Image (tube, rainbow, N blue to C red):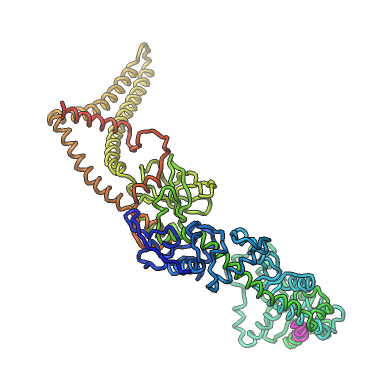
Amino acid sequence: MKLISRTRFKCIGRVWHLDIHDAASLAAVAEVQEVHWIATSVPIQSLRCDDVFLSYIDCDEDGRLGAAELKQAVRWLTGQLKIHTSITAQSTSLSLNHIDPTYTDGQRILAQARKMLAKLGHPDDRELLLTDIRKIKIQAQQAQVSEAGIALPNEAMGDAMRRIIKVTGGSPHPSGQQGVGLAQLNQFIAEAKQCLAWRDQMAEAKSKLSPFGDDGDTAYQIFTAIREPLDHFFSRCLAVAHDPAYAANFGPEAAEVKATDFNSSQSVLALLRQQSIATPTADNLLKQDAVINQAYRPSLYAFREQVLKPLDMDQEPGLSLDQWQQVCHLFGNYDAWLQKKPAATLLSYDSEQLKSDLADGFFDPLRALIASSHETAVELADIRLVEKLALYQGHLLNLANNFVSFPHLYDPASRAIFEHGTLIMDGRCFNMAIGVPDRASHIKATSQSDIFVLYVRVGDDLDLAFPITAGGKGSLSVGKRGIFHDLRGHEHHAVVVHIVENPISLTEALVAPFKRIATLISGKIEKMTTAAEKKLDSATQSTLNQTHATETTTGLSGGGSGGMSGGGAMMAGSMLAGGGVALAAIGSSLAYITKTVLDYGVLKSLGGLLAALVAVLIPIAVLAAIKLRQRDLSSILEGSGWAINARMKLTNVQARHFTQEPKHASRLPDLGLPWWVIAILAFMLSLIVWTIFR
């Protein structure tokens, strides 16, 4: 039954949002142009929602939900139902009476829903729960043959199927076990045929090694161990025969020699293995009296004794290139046969077993079983349609209210599906948390938002961004720790990793100049104090030096002691003088300030100061008010990969909700100023008021 759509907008946060509160207004989403949507694209990983539900909407499986995909989902949902009250109720319980069978998908959904109720033992019921749908879906996925055509071993073909799994490794079945598909069956048959053919060629291959009797395998192993060094030797002999000058290129590289530890036999042998088995000669001959490389001497001795002697090739003057090529040819056929050796798992089965498996018609039942996967696939497709309808009915309205429209973001009593939880830090609760897939890109986006943003690492791998929207910066700084409560009630460790600083409140902006004044005054006083301390230290040190010299002189002249010595009196006098200098410096500064104020007049001085403060504070207040009013939440979402269609200005309600102090807390606002600066400012304000109203 076609649902009549109803379009209505409402202003939220200085932006017009599509009002989506029931099935009729949801249907309007498919009719309204995307220019009226708040967002037109969103990464799936940003949404706190049922993963299967999101996968059904993401038709192209690109990890993003687009406007076209959401419109398609809305049209499909409203088209499969003739009664739409469950959409408004956001219920995942599927009522059979609400399904419209005039559509093809509706027919399939209704038929499958009835089958599912019969399986549950409630054929007369007219309502199907999502939990029951998923229970039957799991059972279908774990059927003996999956929809992908992977069959589990059954009673009839169990042994043969287990052999196939052992040889090929099998293929994963949704139940978690390994099964057999058509690809594994064909692989097993091909490898079994190759194994039988390889075994048939064994006698012929071994007959080539008859000169070695029962030691043919041993002779082959000795040959393979020396083959590469002898190949290199005779190749170099050919080069020397062509041009003796080539021999200069056969020595070790300087870097190899330098890297060799000549105190280690293993290191030396490693160097020797890079060299020729003997010195190459132009006559292509490995002479029996040649000096043999120590690294290859044992292998060459075994080769002469167990390969060359049985072949009668160990005669003077030595092994020629022609003889070596004959030996390689002799072992060549055996080597080619051995290279085709099947896997050990296949060789563990005797030939009779493999021939039985390859008999005509033996695997026909297994092929039929695999072919029956079509039935499983059809059943699962219908089950997924039922699940899709239940999920769309329960979640699509909420998704539209967090994609097309954002009412939950502006409602303190709600949570948008892209929020993550609450951060507790610095005695406050920060309730707005946005996932940050790429911190560098997100920081670049939020730098233009005029919002103070706190970047926090939660646990080991989750980055979140928190807009700080009320109060002041307080003690927030990089490295500060707190705890994070996700929306499932779990607690995690959290640490600040980055801050994008902007004005947080008008109070903080107005206090900023006084902070700078306090810093300036503190710096000046500290400089004066430091200078006075240096003078006092200098005077003290000078007095100590003079006293020491006086005592030394007195001691040498044999003078007596009584009362305070002359040196002690001098030291005390000098220290008092140094202290007096310091006090005089501070006193003269205060006297100058007092004289200036008295000469100019107290009222004029205070009035001038007040005028200066007003001249500074008014533009600061105006600029801060403009910036605070321009705070834009859309940049924070855009940094997380959203395609935002409207500027979402921060409202006062949001500002107070996103950053909260405990309601029971009663303390003076933390202006970030020293107590004595606040006292001076309060005194000046009181004096101005008294002067005006006296």
In this rendering, would 300 be left or right of 23?
right
Q: Can you tell which quarter of the image residue 288 is in?
A: bottom right
Image coordinates for residue 253, horizontal then vertical, percent:
59, 72
Count of numbered labels shown in the rendering:
0
Residue 498 in sight in this render? yes
Please say if 538 is above or below 38: above
339 in relation to 408, above or below? below
Q: Is residue 610 above or below residue 125?
A: above
Give the quadrant of the C terminus. Answer: top left
Side of 23 where 13 appears, left or right: left
Can residue 449 be seen from the camera position used here?
Answer: no
Furthest-right residue in this view: 214
Q: Closer to the camera, 96 or 11?
A: 96
Q: Is residue 305 above or below residue 477?
A: below
Q: Which of 693/125 is in front?
A: 125
Residue 184, quarter of picture? bottom right
Q: Where is residue 13 drawn, in percent x and y?
A: 34, 53
The residue stretch that appears in magenta: 327-341
**Of residues 201 and 432, the one drawn nearer to the viewer in this rendering:** 432
Classify residue 377 as left or right of residue 493. right
Locate residue 448, reporting x and y percent.
33, 56
- Residue shown at the point (37%, 21%) measured from the top left: 552
Q: Most prominent secondary structure in the magenta stretch?
A: helix
Seen at 77% across and 75% down, the residue is 346
53 within the magenta span = no
Residue 127 as seen in the image, left or right of residue 544: right
Expressed as whole percent of the image width and height from the top left, the position of residue 335 reads 75, 81
Residue 331 is one of the magenta-drawn residues: yes
